[in-house]
Image: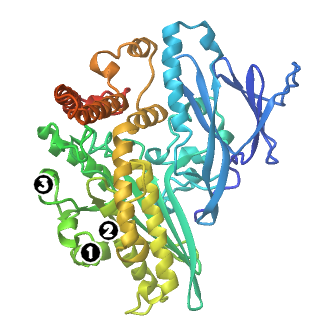
């Protein structure tokens, strides 16, 4: 049912990139008989050629082996070709090999810069510098043979005509990470080079249960609509698309049977923000409260169209800063609640604390009826649909990382047990815990899954990962959580603004414009132009150092006491100034200017 037709033109799996002085030439080397692709180094224009041209200069062209063309990005004057230089096999999805991108490289096509103004050159350099951040993007996966953007259920539901389309035409746009960068290749009708890429996670293991062998795959697909970093992308946009929206699919294969269960996570679907300001936990700000019902309704309507019934599980605290968000989310959900749309609040920290995560069984008792009613996809050995998933559980906390992953892994575990009982692999009272090898590998699967999603959004592995990995909290896990929390603080305050700009540029959320961006590159003024946290910290510490040195001299000359007071006052005053203007001293996105 899910095989692609042989008549579809296959993607090139291995190529050679020739770096000539005036052009790059990409030559298929996987045995395909297709034409080579020439990309001009002047303006990035493309054309197909029958053979690689001979070198006309004494300099021998550099040659790279590449495994796919990610796309091409146009900036102010130049274009930039992004290709895959290293890959590794991550496993298989429904019988098709899946690869993870290990390394990417940017090839500039910017010779036309020579004839541009100094301001334009400066702006181009700033934008192209963001591509160095883009090269390091983590969690990118692809397949040459199957559509990784679609769940098994949606793949199974594809019509015969859709199966004949190239993979990029079949792809779900919201999960197509390189959607924007493929546009130039699409315009040039370069189907064999159009490789769909998904950002997320892909993990797989095989386990024996007695004489039976089962395969378990866990896939995450990150939505590109409101993609970004932890503190610079929160909540929903006016269209109802939310930050950190990830579709997680757990697939079990046994004796030709395929069972698939999909869950989703995403930020609280209201207009809210949490702008970094050097404090450990910046305050939550709800925006445009009058818009909340409309934004939430759009979000839920979109989920209904794609997944059917929706159960929203809200794990945030009932009290404190999170309490306002919780209250607004719960009250707004009442406007859209129906037989097919439910809202359940479960105060994770209050019920489970920091160690008693087994109390999640209380939550499962509240939602088990929804899970049993809406089920999962089940295909028999002939690929015939025996059962389908009719609804989805949407889980959120504040970041949709740590509490969310613990909760989703619990739901995934219960659903896998349910499936194994249905197929007769498990007895009525048998559980995953009854099989130590399966239990251990299932925990590791979900822990790695949570780490991948967390690294993409926050920059660090997930907190509380030791419970998912070992089934209980450990001293080492608690220490790791402390270190990761400090690392998140550093990345969120001093690195993520630039990373957010790179994401917005790559995904087409910000389109460069000659008039606007050449002017903007020279507009940075006032305090923002000189604000430097490392410099301010250095001055504060220097002031305290001089204060301490002066204090030591007081016994020889009492005037040093006043010098000590002066230096201490300067340091305290400067520290207070930095604290009061914390937002300006953080690393902020510059393409979409957030409020100060």
Report, in whole angstroms, how far the alpha carbon at label 1 lies from the one at label 2. Answer: 7 Å
- Residue 339 in sight in this render: yes
Residue at position x 53%, y 13% from top? 121
Q: Which mark is residue 438?
A: none
Count residues near mark 2 (Cα–Cα under 10 Å), then give few for <14, some for 14-19, many for 20+: many
Residue at position x 40%, y 64% from top? 262
Q: Position of residue 282 (x, y in %)?
A: 22, 43
Count residues near mark 3 (Cα–Cα under 10 Å), then give few for <14, some for 14-19, many for 20+: few
Q: Position of residue 595 (x, y in %)?
A: 24, 29
Foreground residue, 36 or 577?
577
Q: On the picture, is 135 further left or further right than 396?
A: right
Instruction: Tell me the residue that label 1 is attached to.
Output: 360
Where disc 3 sits, the SS reads helix
Check contact, mark 1 vs mark 2: CB within 8 A. Answer: yes
Q: Which mark is residue 320?
A: 3
Q: Earlier in the sequence, mark 3 or mark 1?
A: 3
Residue 191, by quadrant, is: top right
Report, in whole angstroms, how far the alpha carbon at label 3 lies from the one at label 1. Answer: 22 Å
Q: On the picture, is 215 further left or further right than 469?
A: right
Instruction: Tell me the residue that label 2 is attached to.
Output: 407
Residue at position x 58%, y 75% from top? 382
């Amino acid at each position: 049912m899910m095989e692609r037709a042989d008549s579809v033109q296959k993607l090139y799996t291995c190529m050679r990139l020739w770096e000539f002085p005036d052009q790059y030439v990409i030559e298929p080397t996987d045995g395909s008989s297709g034409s080579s692709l020439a990309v001009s180094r002047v303006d990035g224009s493309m054309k197909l050629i029958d053979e690689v041209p001979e070198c006309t200069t004494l300099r021998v062209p550099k040659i790279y082996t590449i495994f796919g063309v990610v796309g091409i990005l146009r900036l102010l004057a130049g274009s930039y070709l992004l290709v895959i230089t290293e890959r590794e096999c991550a496993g298989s999805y429904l019988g098709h090999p899946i690869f993870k991108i290990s390394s990417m490289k940017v090839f500039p096509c910017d010779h036309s810069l020579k004839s541009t103004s100094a301001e334009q050159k400066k702006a181009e350099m700033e934008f192209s510098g963001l591509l160095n951040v883009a090269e390091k993007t983590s969690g990118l996966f692809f397949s040459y043979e199957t559509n990784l953007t679609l769940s098994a259920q949606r793949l199974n539901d594809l019509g015969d005509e859709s199966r004949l389309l190239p993979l990029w035409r079949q792809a779900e746009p919201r999960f197509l990470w390189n959607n924007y960068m493929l546009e130039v290749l699409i315009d040039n009708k370069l189907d064999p080079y159009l490789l769909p890429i998904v950002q997320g996670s892909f993990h797989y293991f095989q386990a024996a249960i007695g004489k039976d062998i089962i395969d378990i795959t866990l896939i995450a697909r990150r939505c590109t609509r409101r993609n970004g970093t932890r503190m610079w992308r929160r909540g929903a946009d006016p269209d109802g698309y939310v930050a950190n929206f990830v579709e997680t699919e757990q697939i079990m294969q046994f004796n030709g049977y395929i069972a698939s269960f999909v869950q989703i996570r995403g930020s609280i679907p209201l207009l809210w923000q949490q702008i970094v300001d050097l404090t450990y936990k910046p305050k939550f700000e709800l925006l445009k409260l009058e818009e909340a019902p409309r934004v939430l309704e759009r979000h839920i309507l979109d989920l209904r169209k794609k997944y059917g019934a929706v159960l929203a599980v809200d794990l945030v605290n009932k009290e404190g800063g999170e309490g306002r968000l919780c209250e607004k989310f719960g009250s707004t959900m009442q406007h859209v609640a129906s037989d097919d749309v439910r809202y359940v609040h479960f105060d994770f920290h209050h019920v489970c604390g920091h160690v008693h995560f087994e109390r999640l069984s209380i939550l499962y008792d509240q939602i088990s009826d929804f899970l049993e009613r809406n089920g999962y996809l089940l295909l028999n050995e002939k690929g015939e649909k025996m059962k389908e998933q009719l609804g989805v559980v949407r889980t959120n906390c504040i970041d949709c990382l740590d509490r969310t992953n613990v909760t989703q892994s619990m739901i995934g575990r219960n659903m896998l047990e349910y499936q194994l009982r249905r197929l007769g692999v498990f007895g009525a009272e048998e559980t995953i815990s009854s099989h130590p090898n399966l239990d251990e590998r299932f925990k590791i699967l979900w822990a790695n899954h949570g780490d991948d999603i967390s690294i993409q959004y926050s920059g660090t592995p997930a907190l509380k990962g030791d419970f998912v990995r070992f089934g209980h909290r450990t001293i080492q896990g608690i220490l790791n959580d402390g270190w990761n929390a400090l690392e998140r603080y550093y990345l969120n305050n001093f690195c993520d603004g630039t990373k957010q700009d790179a994401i917005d540029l790559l995904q087409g959320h910000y389109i460069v414009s000659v008039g606007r961006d050449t002017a903007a590159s020279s507009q940075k003024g006032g305090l923002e132009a000189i604000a430097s946290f490392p410099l301010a910290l250095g001055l504060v510490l220097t002031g305290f150092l001089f204060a301490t040195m002066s204090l030591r001299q007081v016994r020889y000359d009492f005037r040093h006491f006043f010098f000590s007071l002066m230096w201490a006052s300067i340091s305290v005053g400067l520290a207070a100034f930095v604290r009061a203007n914390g937002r300006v001293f953080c690393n902020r996105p510059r393409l979409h200017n957030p409020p100060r």
